[in-house]
Image (cartoon, rainbow, N blue to C red):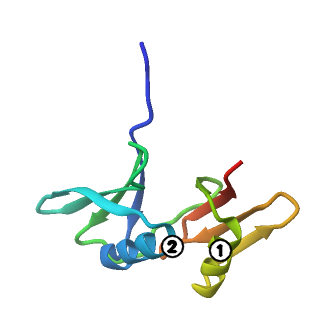
Amino acid sequence: MNFKFAHNNFNVLDLEKSLAFYEEALGLKEVRRHESKDFTLVYLGDGSTTHCLELTYLHDRKEAYNLGENEFHLAFVVDDYDAALKKHKEMNCVIYENPAMHIYFIVDPDGYWLEVVPAK
C-alpha cells in the first residue's frame, strides 16, 4: 500500500473572507468546489503541488469555531522569505516570529496558525 497526502481541512465562518485571505497572504487559488444545501467545500491549491487546503463552510454556522489550544498548523515554504515576512507584517497577520530559527506564523480569519519557512 502507498498512501499520499490529499488535503487538509479548516472549517471557516466567512468563506469569502477566508478565500480573500488565503489568496492575498499565500497565493492559494480555488481549484474545485462542492456545493450542497447545508455546506460548501472549497479546495485551494498552490499551483505547484497536488496537496490542497479544503475550506468547509457550514451555511447555518454563526459562532466561531473552538480551536482548543490550537496546537496544530500547516507550514508553507517560500522562495523569498524576507519579502513574504514584509507582506504579512503589512497585512498585520504575523502572530509569532522566531528570527533565530528563520520561521514565523501568520493567523487566518478563523484563528488557524500557518507557519512560513524559507526554501533551503
Task: Tell me the element at label 2.
Answer: helix
- Point out the image quarter for the N terminus: top left
**Vertical comparison of 99 with 2: above or below:** below
Task: Tell me the element at label 1.
Answer: helix
In the picture, measured across the screen, residue 44 lies left or right of residue 115, that is left
Q: Between residues 103 and 1, which one lies in front from this camera angle?
A: 103
In the picture, measured across the screen, residue 85 lies left or right of residue 58, that is right
Q: Amino acid at mark 2?
A: Ala
Quadrant in the rendering for residue 50: top left
Q: Residue at x 67, y 80 (%)?
A: 86
Residue extending farthest to the top is 1
| Disc 1/disc 2 C-alpha distance (Å) | 12 Å
Quadrant in the rendering for residue 37: bottom left
Nearer mark to the viewer, of 1 and 2: 1
**Vertical comparison of 32 with 112: above or below:** above
Q: Between residues 110 and 6, which one lies in front from this camera angle?
A: 6
Residue 69 seen from this side = no
Residue 65 seen from this side = yes
Q: Residues within 10 Å of mark 2 (few under 14, many from 20)?
A: some
In the picture, measured across the screen, residue 101 lies left or right of residue 22, that is right
**Disc number at residue 37?**
none
Q: Amino acid at mark 1?
A: Ala
Residue that badge 2 annotates: 25
Q: Position of residue 11 (x, y in %)?
A: 39, 61
Q: Position of residue 104 (x, y in %)?
A: 72, 65
**Vertical comparison of 83 with 89: above or below:** above
Q: Residue at x 37, y 79 (%)?
A: 17
Residue that badge 1 annotates: 83
Q: Residues within 10 Å of mark 1 (few under 14, many from 20)?
A: few
**Vertical comparison of 81 with 54: above or below:** below
Q: Residue at x 77, y 70 (%)?
A: 97
